[in-house]
Amino acid sequence: MRETDATGTIAEVSLKNLVQRDDRSHPTPATREVVFDVDKLGVSYDGSIALSGVSLEIYRNYVTAFIGPSGCGKSTFIRCFNHLNDLIPGARINGKILYHEQDLYGPDVDPVEVRKRIGMVFQKPNPFPKSIYDNVAFGPRVLGMTDDLDGRVERALKQAALWDEVGHRLKKSALSLSGGQQQRLCIARCLAVEPEVILMDEPASALDPIATTRIEDLMHELKRDYTIVVVTHNMQQAARVADMTAFFSIERGEEGERSGILVEYDLTEKIFTQPSDERTEDYVTGRFG
Amino acid sequence: MRVTLQEELDTLQSTLLEEGELVLRALRGAMEALEQRDPELADEVIAFDDEVDRQYIGIEEGIASLLARQAPAAGDLRLVLAMLHNNLHLERMADYCVTIAKLTKLVYGITPDQKLIVAFQEMGARDEEMIRAALDSFANRDVAAAESLVELDELVDRGNRRVMGHVLALGSNPALREWGLRMIVVSRCLERIGDHAVDIGEQTAYLVTGEFREFTDASHPERVDT
């Protein structure tokens, strides 16, 4: 019937507009591109297994959150993406992480080059005891990216939403900044070397609610240009910022030994409204343990 | 365990089921007033709606407060959303009972057509059965019972169509015609109460499965999936 068809078309058009306005150019599950392809990854420290059998894909321009109870291996996992576990004696990694189809743990891989492409922000803001400018310029200087260093520092501080607050006092010590500003400075320091991926391990857990909101807003802005992976204890934070959420938990082996496993990985909306696994349901509803 | 959250969810659910009991009382009162042509009972039904409204507002506020403080997720979130809908469905049902009571007062003094009264008795009884089934299916998270509401609703719809036929057959007596027109509205109210019961059933299915679907689709009857 013609009339019905006409109405249907109008409804479809306005629905599309709504989706576009809300989502801008954000990739949909159909158009997303794989940045990391993790296959049966496991990590052990001196023979005791911290994490085992993790397989998942991390998508470009997405915020991906790792949630789970303490000891589930989520921090261990995120540290695998930029070779940070290499620095721990006794740490062993098995399985595979492909970064744009290249083996991240292949024999020719230079961890320093990896960390340039894949930056990291830690739980506690850790600025160097130097000026604001020198903090941001540190990475570019080390890596020889010194053309138009001033411009590079300014761009990084602007992207980290800190320029308006510190642009007039770049020579001041970074330690004079508030905790929230220091964390955004660390993000700017990470952005200054133009990485593709930003890893964040509990980036807001040491901050007050307002500073936390600023970091979350920033993540939302940054995902247009970067791929973000974040570990968080705060489930609501994952629900607010992440496109995809992975829930990790602890499994007990036959002899009572504990190791971290990936329980469920899906769109954040699915994880928080209709998780497939009962263990995820118990965790996100707060009935865990 | 989130003890406070669980307690609040339990309280909200039992308050909602109580609201359902109030609606059943309102329906019984409205039907009794209609059949007995009792304007005083009709007034009582109208006044009784304040009780339903109080319950409705209490649940509404409770849900807003819980959402703000507890940030429920997954099954808890679906329960809260289902209760938010069901609360409104129940309140609407009670409003239809008020409309029936008001119409009863308007036609007081006119001798009714007995066939119609019998048809209304049947529809009212079905509605009562449906409300009970809707509340039970919700309390028991019973999707099969929720889906069975569609068949009961078909009976109410059939009653509604029968009433139309009776009214059209009433002929040209002006007093009776006015009565008949008002009775069409009564019939419509009873039919809508059944629809709201089906809607509550749909919320039960959503709560259990996580996916919302209409049991029947009035705008696309060819797609009906029951």
Image (cartoon, grey):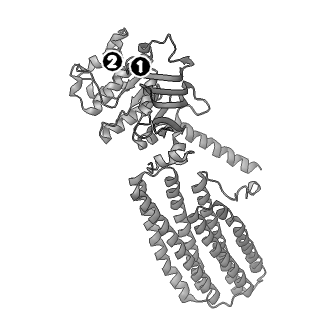
Q: B49 above or below B139?
A: below
Q: Which mark is residue A153?
A: 2
Q: Would you name the residue on which mark 1 appears?
A: A86
In this image, A139 relative to B71: left or right?
left
Q: Is residue B25 visible?
A: yes
In this image, A288 relative to B38: left or right?
left
Q: Label 2 is found on which chain of the structure?
A: A
Pick the residue in front: A37 or A237. Answer: A37
**C-alpha span from label 1 to label 2:** 29 Å
Query: Which picture quadrant has residue B165?
Result: bottom right
Q: Label 1 is found on which chain of the structure?
A: A
Q: Position of residue B210 (x, y in %)?
A: 58, 51
Q: Position of residue A204 (x, y in %)?
A: 34, 35
Q: Nearer the viewer, mark 1 or mark 2?
A: 1
State the residue at coordinates (52%, 76%). B22
Pick the residue in front: A165 or A57. Answer: A57
Q: Which mark is residue B146?
A: none
Q: Secondary structure at mark 1?
A: helix
